[in-house]
Image (tube, rainbow, N blue to C red):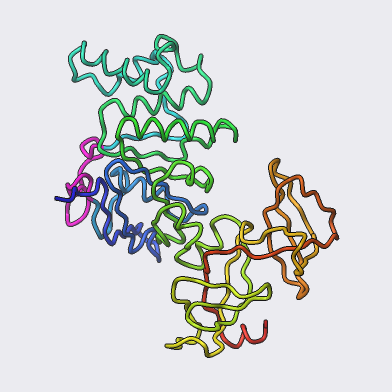
Amino acid sequence: MVNAPVLDIRELEIRYPQASIPVLAGLNLSLAQGDIGCVVGSSGCGKTTLLRAIAGLVPVTSGSIDIAGTRVAGGGIDVPTEKRGVGLVFQDYALFPHLRIDENVAFGLRALPRGERTARVEKLLELVGLRPFARKYPHELSGGQQQRVALARALAPRPQLLLMDEPFSNLDVELRARLGAEVRQILKESGTSAILVTHDQQEAFAIADRVGVMHAGRLEQWDRPYDVYHRPGSRYVADFIGQGVFLPAKVLDSRRVAIELGVLKGDVPLPCSVGCDTCGRGCHVEVLLRPDDVVHDDASPTTAQVVRKAFRGADFVYTLRLDSGREVLALVPSHHDHDIGERIGIRLVADHVVTFAVDEAVATARL
């Protein structure tokens, strides 16, 4: 028997009074037990509203939300937040300044016998690496330590689902990366399912088992991080996630497209623009190229001019101008330090053909 997902959302719509368009519309999402999901998107896309709806802080207009197989919203049902079995972690930590760290963690365990409560607090402080700080107060801890206290407090009542709203946004970049990895390990060790909202794509990729990309109140894609990056489900996702450029291409047949840099082969059917049923008719598409699809190769007869470069320590991201004037990005090891204006050899190593249909007249004019 297949276990029910810990979170199952169907055709969710949220509309505020007097609003002409819904904040969320037609949203479907499922999260397996023990998985961590991250929702990313630009400001105002609805990702925080989604989190608040799951928590029961925003009423549902239509659709449904099930947590651990129980309907908590939709169809006339609206279970209060405190009875949904969810834990909440906010970006401002929301710790009680007058309580010690162990007292903060124990706050939601007042119904337990004292001995059981003490054992649970000690276990969680051990899990988050803060047991030596049990009798300190929040102001005596760093920002990262305070966030781990907030996480331990949220995990204390053993929630079915943990909800985190931009939990690392107040921390510096290095600490965010380290704490993100720690939080993933803590959640996996505790077996807790979680949904995290963030604007940081790298944070989402590092923490999540599933990544969702939201745009204008709709979930554009909900998939493995690898697939969101390499197999984007829409032009918006392809443009929003990571770095990349779009080059015009001509469809040669059902497995090949030709671009300025050569012929790319794919193992999936390619979408043609004008709705043709068979390829090989000169249909035009756009191909997404990531920086790691273009490799620096001094022996290659194909060259491009360096017009910009961004040093990232271990590598450069070069912006290269092709003979046509179009530009591509290339990820190059940092010991290949080329000057602006220099021409370097490049070759394609793309093994994922990601194409998007374009208007045929526009495509023809571009080629």
Query: Which residue of the protein is positioned furthest toward the bottom in this rendering?
Result: 281
Q: Position of residue 271 (x, y in %)?
A: 47, 78
Q: Is 211 in front, or is 335?
A: 335
Q: Dividing the picture into quarters, in which one does residue 364 lie?
A: bottom right
Above or below: residue 290 compared with residue 274 = above
Residue 69 in magenta stretch = yes
Q: Position of residue 39 (x, y in %)?
A: 43, 50
302 with respect to 2 (left or right): right
336 with respect to 110 (left or right): right
Start and end of the magenta stretch?
A: 66-85
Q: Position of residue 279 (x, y in %)?
A: 48, 86
Identify which residue is drawn at 52% across, 88% down: 280
Above or below: residue 344 compared with residue 91 = below
Q: Is 319 in front, or is 131?
A: 319
Identify which residue is drawn at 40% across, 32% down: 185
Identify which residue is drawn at 30% across, 49% down: 31
Q: Is 60 in front, or is 26?
A: 26
Residue 359 in magenta stretch = no
Total numbered badges shown on the rendered structure: 0
Query: Which residue of the protein is positioned furthest toward the left in this rendering?
Result: 1
Q: Position of residue 116 (x, y in %)?
A: 21, 15
